[in-house]
Amino acid sequence: MTEAAQPRAQGAVRLGIKKRDGSSVLASLHQRGSLKLLFPRGSGDALTGVLLNTAGGVTGGDRFSIAAEADAGCHLVLTTQAAERAYRAQPGETGRIDTRIVLGTGSRLDWLPQETLLYDGAALSRRLRVEMASDARALLVEPVILGRAAMGETVRDLAFHDRIEITCDGKLLMSDRTRILGDAVERMEGPAIGAGCGAWASVVLAAPDAERLLAPARALMPVTGGVSLVRDGLLFARLLAQDGFTLRETMLPLIRLLNGGDLPRTWMI
Amino acid sequence: MGTGAPIPMRTDPNALLTLSQWLSPAYPVGAFSYSHGLEWAVAQGDVHDRASFSRWLRDILEYGAGRSDAILLADAYRADDAAETDALARALAPSRERLAETVNQGAAFARATAPIWETPFEDLCYPVAVGVAAKFCGLPLRDTLALFLYAFAGNLSSAAMRLVPLGQSDGQAVLAECAPLCLSLAEAAMEASPDDIGSCVLAADIGAMKHETQATRLFQS
């Protein structure tokens, strides 16, 4: 048991990006442990980073951290190589993923990780914190799937904490906190909770012109999805879906609308 | 109470009566005009009878705004300055109407309470405003939490009686069944901190968003 209490995998990525000749380029990069950042060519003026978890998933006791800082006017796109898998954790152990991104004036972030799959017995605590200047732009998407529905897996035991927090000029703009403890399948059956769905996504756009996108975003919503201009400059959407496949059907058009372009290539493979 | 608990500014000998007045449906905070997304859930057929409303309500209390608001109320009660609690309360709102629901009720509560009890007049979200006023008047936190939660449940039960519709006795029975849950949530909020806040009422949040464009509306949320 003493061995189980030790962290199984650790990984950290820290990067800074700056503007050079009209393009966003790396100013600094530090990588450690089982988290790597890859840079595919050809993403225009934006810098696209693809996160790769070489440990092949997250389990109890794992620690991952991502820190990024974008200078004025930079455009940073972060995604993942594949879906992240949170496996059964040892008793009393929780895997942690902490992400902190600082956005300078006029900069832009597209945080577009692929789905996180929560398996039976998973214990995962995740925080995404974005500290932005009021004229910066941040699109944040976090899709989550319960178990492997196609394989008949049900998630009867889960400890999942997911926090998305945005500060704008130092003031707290939003704090979306998902907390599911215990029998996730039973919980999701509730008409206020999941209405029997097994996948969901939170989609946030913090941008000065967010209001402009409210009507077109509404037009894309399925019956099980909603979008609201919670405050000026803050558009928030929640999507529920039967499974990961149907979630992508509604989520991808919404992402394309909100980022004004296509998805990172890793999503399409 | 722990040794670190704040000392209320004064003690109200009528504590229980004051609380029941503040948290009665007749107190002018406009609670009756908010359905917390229930109006959409009923229109969709997700809530259609006593059993489905009971499940919806209990989940809102235990996994939604009930538990979160109780923790915010307790935090505001303990805090020297409730500004940070209030900023969090606003940041937690998942939709425009849900933000208005807590901001408008908080403002109405302060407007109604300040002239009578000389409580501070501040622009605070509803649970934060109640926590600040209860502390100021020396009202016990545990009772404040329990009555706040029960008032929230009572308001949603009244909305269900109108919307589903549920008969008076079914609506009152669902509410009565929630009493032990409200007490246990109040008890748990005494020990919790804002870091413990989290919810999973995704469908109710979506319902509150959908309600913005719902064709026929009796309620403001």
Image (cartoon, coloured by chain):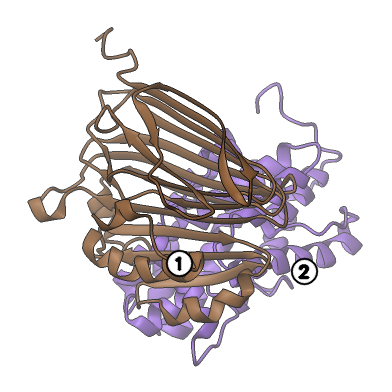
Chain colours: A brown, B purple
Q: Chain of mark 2?
A: B
Q: Quadrant of residue B74?
A: top right
In three-dimensional space, the C-alpha distance between marks 1 and 2, rounded to whole angstroms, equals: 44 Å
Residue A198 left/right relative to B28: left
Q: Can you say which quadrant of the picture contains the C terminus of chain B?
A: bottom right
Task: Say what secondary structure mark 1 lies in.
Answer: loop
Task: Say what secondary structure mark 2 lies in.
Answer: helix
Q: Chain of mark 1?
A: A
Q: Can you say which quadrant of the picture contains the N terminus of chain B?
A: top right
Residue A132 left/right relative to B95: right
- Residue lying at 37% horizontally and 28% vertically, measured from the top left: A35
Q: Against B77, is A93 above or below?
A: above
Three-letter code for the amino acid on which mark 2 is drawn: Ala
Which of A177 and B18 lies nearest the eye of the viewer?
A177
Q: Quadrant of residue A80?
A: top left
Badges 1 and 2, same chain: no
Residue at the top extreme of this rendering: A2
Residue at the bottom extreme of this rendering: B216
Residue A261 marker: 1
Q: Quadrant of residue B111?
A: bottom right
- Residue lying at 27% horizontally and 36% vertically, measured from the top left: A122
For marks 1 and 2, give the one nearer the viewer: 1
Look at mark 2 in the image and give the residue it sits on: B108
Residue A253 left/right relative to B70: left
Q: Tell me if residue A207 can be seen.
A: yes
In the image, residue B45 lies at what x, y percent?
A: 32, 81
